[in-house]
Amino acid sequence: MRGIVALRGEIVQVVDLRRRFALPETELSAESRILVVQSGGDAVAGILVEAVLEVAHFAPGAVRAADPGLVAVRGLVERAGESVSLLDLDRLLEVDVVA
């Protein structure tokens, strides 16, 4: 957990994805954002990301299964010749996803 923020009178924990995946930390920049998300279990959290490039919508039929060994990846979508990983918010917000 990176910290907490107040959102409309509610305290929301902020998860740093770099810490979550044991990657080296980087400095916050003007592009850094906190994405407020709600998981399938109705948990609300903030996810600290380095930048947001775009917001996209995918049809359910466009999502293919991810390799079961990929931690917290729900599925993959092909877009402009590249694979886009769709994160599993429930797994990301679990306490013991990554050692």
Image (cartoon, rainbow, N blue to C red):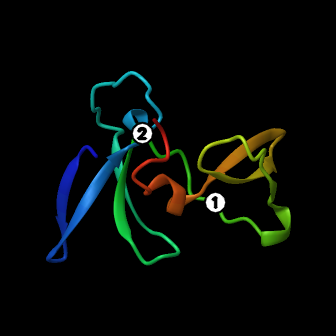
Q: CA distance from mark 1 to mark 2?
A: 24 Å
Residue 41 location (% of width, % of height): 48, 76
Circle 2 Cα neighbour tier, 10 Å, few/some/many (<14 / 14–19 / ≥20): some
Q: With 91 as the anchor, is 51 left or right in this view?
A: left
The residue that label 2 is drawn on is: 20
Of residues 81 and 46, the one drawn nearer to the viewer in this rendering: 46
For the residue labelled by badge 2, is the local secondary structure a helix, a strand or a loop?
Answer: helix
Q: Quadrant of the C terminus?
A: top left
Q: Residue at x 37, y 34 (%)?
A: 19
Instruction: Identify the residue shown where x is 26% and y is 58%.
Output: 13
Relative vertical location of residue 90 with respect to residue 50 in this rendering, above or below:
below
Mark 1, residue position: 56
Mark found first going from the N terminus, 1 or 2: 2
| Front tag of 1 and 2 | 2
Q: Quadrant of residue 65?
A: bottom right
Q: Is residue 67 above or below residue 8?
A: above
Q: Residue 86 placed where, x, y %?
A: 65, 53
Q: Tag 1: Cα neighbours inside 10 Å, few (<14), some, or many (≥20)?
A: few
Whether residues under marks 1 and 2 lie with C-beta atoms below 8 angstroms apart, the answer is: no
Q: Amino acid at mark 1?
A: Ala
Left or right: where 86 falls relative to 24: right
The residue lying toward the viewer, choosing from 72 and 28, is: 72
